[in-house]
Image (tube, coloured by chain):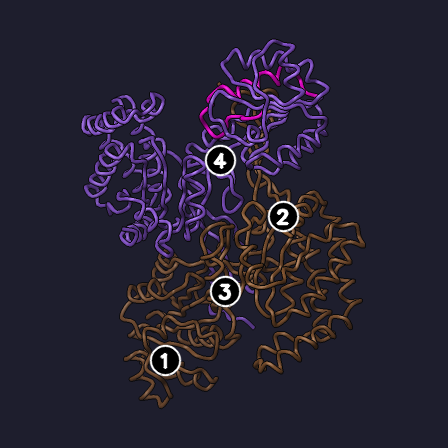
Chain colours: A purple, B brown
């Protein structure tokens, strides 16, 4: 399968932007036309999920209505409208000896994606892969098996009908052996991107011999500095925690400088609790919570290390900016770390010393997002340092190639 | 050791360019001053090597004369003169909501290097690491153990004397267990770069759980197209093969279009053989060699897959540009692939369809080199697609960080 994907990748790499965009529109139209077939397959997944006791929140992520199918197809049209990263000249110069060198963006080749429930990821990943000239091998969650199979079938049929090698989009089925084969297909798979929970990502990182980009582990903090504007701090805390608690750029911990904690925390804890947030407070924060009459549990080290991905938050009082930085070094996952402060020097130290994909100054952690950054698309948020860090979009799915043009040049 | 390196890395990341450059000059001066001590330690390595039957060519790579120590120290001064990649703004914009975002280059953190004989790599890697704000953990070849120990001791003493944390430069000693610990130090080591033979590199890639950049596997080809200028082709062939046969950007295979083979090969084979190159020729090239009275062995598939790193070359006649492309796809290692042609369309196809770090048009394969590309330094040549491809210098030792500045911004 990876070998067939490689052949397709060679063809994709040579497609013009116009041809790729036309193909994306054709895929979108094909998905629209197949709405009934897709919704019917999705109903089988949903039925299986309900019988297996799938929680309502997961059912909601899995369900495909005709409106959602339209949205998925429109996402492909949006990708078609994005600039093509392939062929972009990253650097170039004419050397002293007259050699002309330039570094161009080229597709990676074959990109594997391993992800969990949502069937829209299947189409998004295929579309981003196609636009960036890559063949994709998709491994979705078993909960969405029937939906994914139909989505990929429809796209492959459309590719074939438009003269594009259908192996540009492959769905990896089969058991754990199939996944293991994908993770060790050195020379056939150029990049593997796991998207999902920490267990999935760790398993892929530890067992892969092909290059991997880790995504989406986010133990994000909001630090309210002693020079914070407390109104901004409250708005940023509430937004970071409650705007969409299940995602990786939601905040999991609140740190408050001791000099503003007596002013800030009674209000913040009351408002968080009022929004349904379960609070895990350290000793000093617990004392304030008690006084404010806000329910809390005493935070353990584990609580500070936990990504709740839910309406739950650990809260600590720190004695200094240094203590806050040390806390983030200990517990942070290198995703997004926010400071709220009006003090330029504190903001400057936070920006310089926090080691993370994104540092927020007086802004919600929720802004670490390809869409918010204006990328027009997102394949995941990298929390590693190699190749890509932070939101990944089309350019992050490319590598480069040096073209060196001479006229019989030799080294002396 | 990696934990201590991480602490040093935090300090290095905050050093100004001026402080880093002053430190590099101090290291260079310290090495100059310690020339006798370095040469004496090197003599111990050499003595051990001679007693163990080390080949003369390896002894030559290992030996440190006072002149070579001066050159090694001067290389540090050259690194000081290079621009600092840290802090460079890669991208940035002001979003519609007024958020100001910018992506800055920041150091990786802790970079491990595993390499073989040459002791100058020890100092080069330390200097490039320091300039890019990274702590390095160096694992050199056992043949240079005494030289490396003294070089690192001298540099660490100089760091300490200048108020820089000496753990910025660490030498990993001990057996295979130590190397295995380095390869699996997830969260402590940010990047591992193996430099050396294929066995070393494969072992590191397969056994590491920390991110790795593969370097230096080079099965490079020169393809002489039917539209080649045969004088340029001869010069490029000779230079690619014989200029420095032991390195990764030397050519290992010559492919010649059948329509120019009768003209080109008699002269080329004669000249290669005259330069001492052992020839492995396919059936058609063998016929020409026979006629020209040039000694040859009949090439096997293995010969075409072999990086000789010596005065030895496989030679094949191909029927078309497509056949040449297919041959390179089959046997190439994705390092450097050269075409010699005056035909713009052939050059364009070669540049587009060859999947390699560098494509040469009418130029020697030997130009794939950080120094030749004007980078001023080189830490290795990446033959993988993730993060860096081709010659790696200071920017390739950095990652990025997004800084997002708002004024109480929250997502709606």
Q: Is A242 in the magenta?
A: yes
What residue would you read off at disc 1? B280
Which residue is located at x 42 percent, y 32 percent? Answer: A376
What residue would you read off at disc 3? B200
Give me the C-alpha separation between circle 4 and circle 1: 52 Å
Eye-nearest disc, 4 or 1: 4
Please give the label number shown on residue A217: 4
Q: Where is residue A294 in the image (x, y as percent from the top left)?
A: 58, 11
Q: What chain is tagged by disc 2?
A: B
Residues at marks 1 and 2 on the same chain: yes
Q: Single out the residue that lies furthest toward the bottom.
A: B293
Q: Give the range drawn in magenta.
A: A227-253
Q: Kindly state the secondary structure of the residue where label 2 is placed.
A: loop
Residue neighbourhood size for the residue with mark 2, other residues' Cα within 10 Å, grouped as few (<14), some (14–19), many (≥20): many
Please give the label number shown on residue B85: 2
Give me the C-alpha separation between circle 2 and circle 3: 29 Å
């Amino acid at each position: 399968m990876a070998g067939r994907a490689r052949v397709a990748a060679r063809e994709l790499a040579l497609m013009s932007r116009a041809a790729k965009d036309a193909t994306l529109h054709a895929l979108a139209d094909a998905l629209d036309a197949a709405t009934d077939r897709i919704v019917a397959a999705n109903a089988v997944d949903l039925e299986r999920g309900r019988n297996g006791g799938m929680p309502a929140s997961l059912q909601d992520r899995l369900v495909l209505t005709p409106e959602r199918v339209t949205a998925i197809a429109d996402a492909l049209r949006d990708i078609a409208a994005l600039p093509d990263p392939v062929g972009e000249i990253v650097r170039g110069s004419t050397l002293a000896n007259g050699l002309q060198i330039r570094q161009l963006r080229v597709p990676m080749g074959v990109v594997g994606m391993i992800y969990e429930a949502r069937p829209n990821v299947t189409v998004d990943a295929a579309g981003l892969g196609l636009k960036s000239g890559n063949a994709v091998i998709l491994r979705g969650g078993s909960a969405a098996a029937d939906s994914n199979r139909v989505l990929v079938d429809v796209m492959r049929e459309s590719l074939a009908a438009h003269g594009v090698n259908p192996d540009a989009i492959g769905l990896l089925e089969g058991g754990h052996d199939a996944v293991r084969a994908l993770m060790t297909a050195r020379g056939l798979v150029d990049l593997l991107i796991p998207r999902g929970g920490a267990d999935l990502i760790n398993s892929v990182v530890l067992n892969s011999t092909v290059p991997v980009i880790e995504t989406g582990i986010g133990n994000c903090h909001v630090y309210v500095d002693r020079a914070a504007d407390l109104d901004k701090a409250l708005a940023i805390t509430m937004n970071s925690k409650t705007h969409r608690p299940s995602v990786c750029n939601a905040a999991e911990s609140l740190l408050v400088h001791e000099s503003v904690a007596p002013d800030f925390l009674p209000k913040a804890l009351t408002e968080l609790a009022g929004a349904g947030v379960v609070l895990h407070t350290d000793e000093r924060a617990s004392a304030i919570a008690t006084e404010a009459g806000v329910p809390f549990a005493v935070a353990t080290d584990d609580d500070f290390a936990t990504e709740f991905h839910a309406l739950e938050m650990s809260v600590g009082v720190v004695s200094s900016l240094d203590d806050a930085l040390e806390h983030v070094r200990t517990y942070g996952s290198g995703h997004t770390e926010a400071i709220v402060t009006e003090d330029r020097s504190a903001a400057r130290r936070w920006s310089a010393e926090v080691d993370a994909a994104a540092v927020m100054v007086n802004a919600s952690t929720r802004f670490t997002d390809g869409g918010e950054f204006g990328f027009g698309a997102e394949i995941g948020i990298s929390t590693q340092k190699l190749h890509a860090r932070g939101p990944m979009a089309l350019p992050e799915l490319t590598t480069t190639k040096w073209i060196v043009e001479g006229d019989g040049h030799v080294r002396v």
